[in-house]
Image: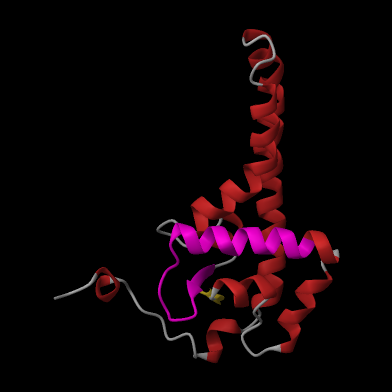
Amino acid sequence: MISEQDLQPHLDVENPNLYRGIILRRILAYLIDLTVIAVIVAIAWFAFPLITALTLGLLTPFLLLFTALVPAIYHTLLIGGPASATFGMRFFGIQVWTSDGLKPGYAQALINTVVFYLSVATTSWLILIIALLNSKNRCLHDLLAGTVVVRQ
């Protein structure tokens, strides 16, 4: 019987050409992603006063929680989606794949995103130096989530 994994495209994650210049592309892609996230949050904050007034303040805690979760939602939905890339990643021609050469699902994308934000927040970005120490330029969140970031 054919499984769903057999129908997915496979990628040769051992091909060194997939990782050429990936660190700079990742950095620039994240800057675009931060801009998109900032726009989403700004739009939400403009809507908050109206929503707060209409609900007499009852939804305010949920609105604040939504604001905090925007980056996680953004990255999880886009990385776990069909393109396996955020808008910034698409712009710079990179994608997230599993270390087995498959596209990640939403659960794996969520793990990748949560570990990224937790590790960066606790180490002030220093944890990203790990990408300089391995041939595939994988960061801690990539290693823990079982993903690689490659050129398309």
Residue 70: percent from left, percent from top? 63, 42
Compared with residue 103, is residue 109 higher up or lower down, i.e. above or below?
above
In the picture, measured across the screen, residue 17 lies left or right of residue 37, that is: left
Magenta part of the protein: which range?
94-120
Residue at image point 75% right, 65% down:
119
Where, quadrant-wise, is the N terminus in this rendering?
A: bottom left
Compared with residue 29, is residue 7 higher up or lower down, i.e. above or below?
below
Quadrant of the rendered image containing residue 41: top right
Residue 149: percent from left, percent from top? 57, 74
- Is residue 29 visible in the rendered image? The answer is no
Q: Residue furthest left?
A: 1
> Number of numbered discs present?
0
- Is residue 104 visible in the rendered image? The answer is yes
In the picture, measured across the screen, residue 21 lies left or right of residue 18, that is: right
Residue 32: percent from left, percent from top? 68, 54
Q: Which of 148 and 120 is in front in this view?
A: 120
Residue 16 inside the magenta-drawn segment: no
Compared with residue 114, is residue 66 higher up or lower down, i.e. above or below?
above
Quadrant of the rendered image containing residue 134: bottom right
Residue 108 inside the magenta-drawn segment: yes
Residue 6: percent from left, percent from top? 26, 76
Residue at image point 42% right, 79% down:
101
Q: Nearer the viewer, residue 111 or 133?
A: 111
Q: Which of 127 and 30 is in front in this view?
A: 127
